Image (tube, rainbow, N blue to C red):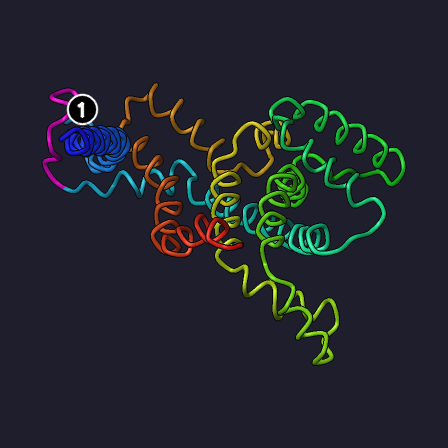
Amino acid sequence: MEKTEKVGKGNSGEKIYKIFIYVVLILLAVSIVVPVAWVFMASIKQNSEFYGNPWALPAGFYWQNFVDAWNKASMGSYMLNSVIVTALALAILLVVALPAAYVLSRFQFKGRKFLNVCFMGGLFINVNYIVVPIFLMLRDGDLWLKNLVGGSFLLNNIFVLAVVYAATALPFTIYLLSGYFATLPHDYEEAAYIDGAGYGRTMISVIFPMAQPSIITIILFNFLSFWNEYIISMTLMSSTKAPRTLPVGLLNLMQAQQSAAQYGTMYAGLVLVMLPTLILYICVQRQLTQGMTVGGLKG
């Protein structure tokens, strides 16, 4: 009887715990979905509809908001700049981080522990705290170049901004990739070496395909980080003639449209910022789930 009562109490406690988890997850989902859905609905409303019930459904689809945000507010050029910066930063990051993480996790050499400690230390440095030193360093570099060759290009440069993005993401990226590479068995590499493949060929043809879910996870995380980054872009692209990224351009749009009471255009700009990230997440959702779980399933 006592055992039966204990089993019954255990089952009831487990059910209460599951109900609690489900309620928390539902509340979290609602807190995310409702604001996003509201922004999408607000983006197709006319200005007159914002002075009534804010939760009322749109009277129709007013697509002119997107046209105005894309053309008049220059969101199209801002988006192109963000695409270029994000693509360049991801390319630079992967070219550097993938071989570095592979070497640090699979080979023993002098200085390996020191490099690992340096990258681990980078995880605890908030990028926002070093924006000003980065700006001052680039400004001094521009002054030196101007005195040397009569021109400067370090500030207000999309390529330099992409390099800074990639450099600030290196510690986190190498840390995650190294942890995954370390779980892979050495048998595959040894088989490749026996077949005559070198270190580079083995890394590219054997290890990287096996690490595809983890690499896709890294790409998605860093894409979101680069795409939504504001402080570094605003600081390093401070000139009025410098190309602006989407977050900086969106702030300018919000300030301009609030003063002009063009709320529909403002929310259309928000949708333009969110849409690429939502599309990317939908496309790589399965690979992202594999990348988050496969490391824990291996050895």
Determine which quarter of the picture holds residue 268: top left
Q: Residue furthest right?
A: 148
> Where does the image place residue 37, in percent across and percent down from the top left?
22, 36
Crowding near pointer 1: few (<14 within 10 Å), some, many (20+)? Answer: some
Q: Is residue 236 left or right of residue 262?
A: right
Secondary structure, mark 1, is: helix
Residue 196 versus residue 247: which sits nearer the camera? 196
Q: Is residue 14 left or right of residue 185?
A: left
> Which range of residues does the magenta coloring cover?
51-60
| Three-letter code, disc 1 | Phe
Q: Residue furthest bottom?
A: 195
Q: Residue at x 27, y 30 (%)?
A: 28
Can residue 113 be spotted in the picture?
yes
Residue 182 versus residue 101: which sits nearer the camera? 182
Relative to 205, is 15 above or below?
Answer: above
Specify the quadrant that holds the N terminus.
top left
Q: Is residue 150 left or right of residue 3?
A: right
Residue 274 versus residue 71: which sits nearer the camera? 274
Count of residue discs? 1
Can residue 264 be spotted in the picture?
no
> Where does the image place residue 141, in percent across and percent down from the top left?
81, 33
> Where does the image place residue 269, in percent across and percent down from the top left?
35, 36
Magenta residues: mostly which secondary structure? loop
Check if residue 54 falls in the magenta segment: yes
> Where does the image place residue 209, in percent across and percent down from the top left?
55, 65
Check if residue 246 falls in the magenta segment: no
Relative to 128, is 98 above or below?
Answer: below
Q: Residue at x 32, y 30 (%)?
A: 266
Residue matched to label 1: 50
Q: Residue furthest front?
A: 1
